[in-house]
Image: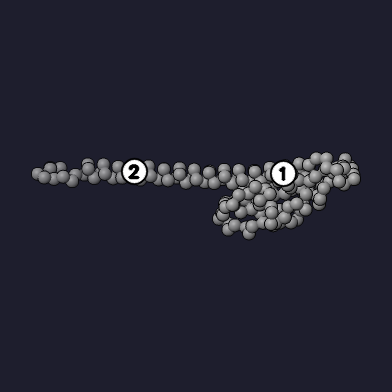
Amino acid sequence: MRMRKGQVFTLDLLISLVAATLAIGLLFHTMETRIYNQKGAELSSDLKRVADNAGNMLAASNQIICELRDADSTTHIDYLNNCIDTTKINSSNAKSLMGIPDGYGARVYFGGTEWGDDLPPSDIDFIEETRTVILHDGPVFKDAFEAHSFSTEDFTIRVWKT
C-alpha cells in the first residue's frame, strides 16, 4: 500500500487501538469481578461471625442458660451451658440477649416454635447456626439433673443483613 503525503490514520494504528481497547476492557472486567467476589466473601464472613456469636451467647450466657439449683429450690449451684431457660428468652429480647447488632435481621426456630424478624426476600443472603440444646422452663433442680431426665432440641438461628 502506497502512503500518501500527510496520511496519519493507518491500518496498523487501527489494529493497535482495537487491541489496546480490548486489553483495557478485559482488565476492568477482571477488577470488577474480583471486587464483587471480595464483597460477597466479606458479607458471608460478617454473617457467619454474627451467627457464631449468637450461637455462643445462646449456649453460654448466664442471661439465657438454665440455673442449676439445689433441691430446696433457693440455693444456686451453677449455670448449665447448652440448657436454654425458655422463661428468660422471648421474641422481644432474643436479639439483644444473643448479641445480634442493629442492622441485622434474625429469626429463631426451636421446639416447634419460631419467632423474630420477618423473613427477608429470597434474594437476600442469610446464614443459619444450629445448636443442639436442652430446652427447660425455669431453673433445673439438682435431682432432675442427676437423673438425666432431659431431651435435646435443635435451636436454629437465621441471620441476615438488613
Can you tell which mark lies on residue 12?
A: none
Q: Please provide percent x and percent y for residue 31.
A: 41, 43
Q: Is residue 5 left or right of residue 24?
A: left
Specify few, some or many for label 1: CA neighbours under 10 Å numbering under 14, 14-19, or 20 or more: some
Could you tell me the amino acid type at mark 1?
Ser
Category of crowding for the residue at label 2, using alpha-carbon neighbours closer than 10 angstroms: few (below 14), some (14–19), many (at least 20)? few
The label on residue 61 is 1
Q: Position of residue 104 (x, y in %)?
A: 59, 52
Query: In the depicted view, which residue is nearer to us: 62 or 15?
Result: 62
Between 135 and 137, the one nearer to me in the picture: 137
39, above or below 114, in the image: above
Could one spot residue 133 in this view of the protein?
no
Between 116 and 156, the one lying in front of the other is 116
Q: Which quadrant, please, contains the N terminus? A: top left
Residue 12: where, in percent of width, then height?
22, 41
Dot 1 or dot 2: first in sequence order is: 2
Q: Which residue type carries mark 2?
A: Ile
Q: Left or right? Give the position of 9 relative to 142.
A: left
Q: Is residue 14 left or right of residue 156?
A: left
Residue ID for mark 2: 24
Total numbered labels placed on residues in the image: 2
In the picture, residue 50 is in which quadrant?
top right
Q: Measuring 68% from the left and 49% from the top, which residue is drawn there?
A: 97
- Res. 83 in view: yes
Mark 1 element type: loop
Could you tell me how far apart the alpha carbons at marks 1 and 2 are, in whole angstroms? Answer: 54 Å
Which residue is located at x 12 percent, y 43 percent? 3
Residue furthest to the left in view is: 5
Secondary element at tag 2: helix
Q: Quadrant of the C terminus?
A: bottom right
Left or right: residue 24 versus residue 90 is: left
